[in-house]
Image (cartoon, helix red, strand yellow):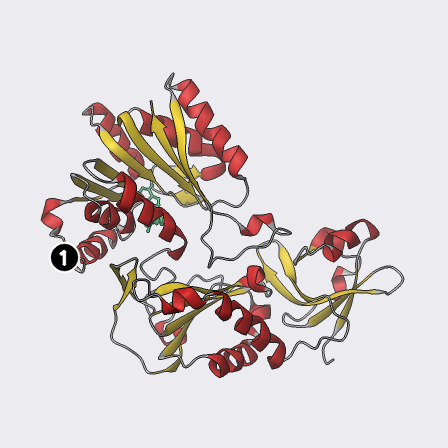
Amino acid sequence: MKNEITLKIKSNFIDKYKNGYPLIFQESILNLASLREEGAIVTLVDEKNHFIARGYYGRQNKGYGWVLSRKINEEIDEAFFQSSIASALNQRKSLYQDTETTAFRAFNGEGDGIGGFTIDYFDGYYLINWYSEGIYRFKDMILGALTSLVDPKAIYQKKRFDSSGQYIEADDFVLGERPEFPLIVKENGVNFAIYLNDGAMVGVFLDQRDVRKKIRDQYAKNRSVLNTFSYTGAFSVFAALGGATNTTSVDLANRSLPKTIEQFNINGIDEKDQTIIVQDVFQYFKYANRKNLQFDMVILDPPSFARSKKHTFSASKDYTDLLKQTISITADKGIIVASTNCSTFNMNTFKGFIDKAFKEMKANYRLVEEFSLPEDFKTIKAFTQGNYLKVLFIEKV
Ligand code: SAH
């Protein structure tokens, strides 16, 4: 195969790859210098040149690419991409048929066999996220494979490997007919406004679908709800629809105000009955503590890392502190929904943060619900970092 590079794997890492580990990582490679151009096909071999696996070179965070196949004769061509994508779409059949949910993840990178890109579905429109220059080199094959299987109204893309972080609208459109934005999609009967042409974040994080449903169906009724790091207010909308007495959404970004109003309005909720605050959450906590505010439900969904003018937040270092400030403004028998998408610690560590926070605040708690990624965000056992989402519902008792 053209461009094929042989990568020698250190003996102590061979079993790891053989057992299904998909990420090609630096410490395992003896001849790193052979890697030049992203998108090259690589063959992983042992010290005796015996075949282990085939993959591609692409820099993504600390990774050097992804394993694609463990069959010696399998070619990485359009038919290869087509069969992986077809299998993924087939596993989402029930979501495709669900008229109440028209937005979901159609292809989830390594969880569906090919690391480095994802495909999201928004009511006939598709969004591809590319995570490395390397996988982007396969763009034509992947588009060919996808369009041979479905008939998209349009395809948009985000090149997330662009270190400039600049998203150029013209660059986001790939093919089809440009729609008017926002698209109005549904999730369990609730409307979301989606903008595929407006930066990295399109309006909703699809991985919280099950959590939002749970809040609406079982927890919101007659509760006052504080939603922190609220973005477009998706949790607030579900809480309001579930019968919350009121919702307060707090986010630092100016855009969160019009976007949250829009989200309420497209669901028939008057935003004047809700509270939307553009402020640093840590400032808001100070205010709420000073005023002795109490909420029956507090939702915490911070980014893994965030820097504001006065504060740097890192989930792995500061989650316990965030919880401590939350506990004091949560009413007795109230619920804290603690969420994190940080992949550097696991659920047990997360539970440890929670335990520590409650102990230090001399408060008692009970874990009442536990969520990780929903089914369409498919993950594999061999790559636990892929299952990044951790959500716990904690009752203050
Ligand atoms: N919970 C949201 C997603 C959160 S995305 C949802 O379910 O849709 C993270 C959000 O945190 C962004 O909107 C960002 O503006 C906000 N953010 C980051 N640091 C913040 C801070 N210190 N105070 C308030 N909001 C912050």
Mark 1 and ligand 1: say if the CB distance to the nearest ligand atom is below 8 Å: no
Q: Is residue 70 left or right of residue 177?
A: right
Quarter where residue 3 is shown? bottom right
Q: Residue furthest top?
A: 362
Quarter where residue 109 is shown? bottom right
Quarter where residue 332 is shown? top left
The residue shown at (36%, 53%) is: 209
Q: Is residue 63 left or right of residue 368?
A: right
Task: Where is residue 13? Give x, y as percent.
Answer: 77, 51
Number of other residues with Cα within 10 Å of mark 1, as a class: few under 14, some 14 to 19, many 20 or more: few
The residue shown at (31%, 67%) is: 99
Residue that label 1 marks: 268
Task: Where is residue 296? Give x, y as percent.
Answer: 24, 31
Q: Is residue 167 visible?
A: no
Residue nearer the viewer, 246 or 376: 376
Q: Is residue 26 left or right of residue 110?
A: right
Q: What SS does tag 1 mark? A: loop
Task: Where is residue 363? Give x, y as percent.
Answer: 36, 19
User: Is 30 located above or below residue 222 in the figure?
Assistant: below
The residue shown at (37%, 26%) is: 324
Residue nearer the viewer, 350 or 106: 106
Q: How many numbered discs?
A: 1
Residue nearer the viewer, 208 or 97: 97
Q: Is residue 136 left or right of residue 273?
A: right
Q: Give the amino acid type for the residue marked by disc 1 in the picture.
A: Gly
The residue shown at (56%, 80%) is: 141
User: Is 27 located above or below residue 140 in the figure?
Assistant: above
Task: Where is residue 94? Give x, y as percent.
Answer: 42, 65
Quadrant assignment for the C terminus:
top left
Quadrant assignment for the N terminus:
bottom right
Q: Is residue 328 visible?
A: yes
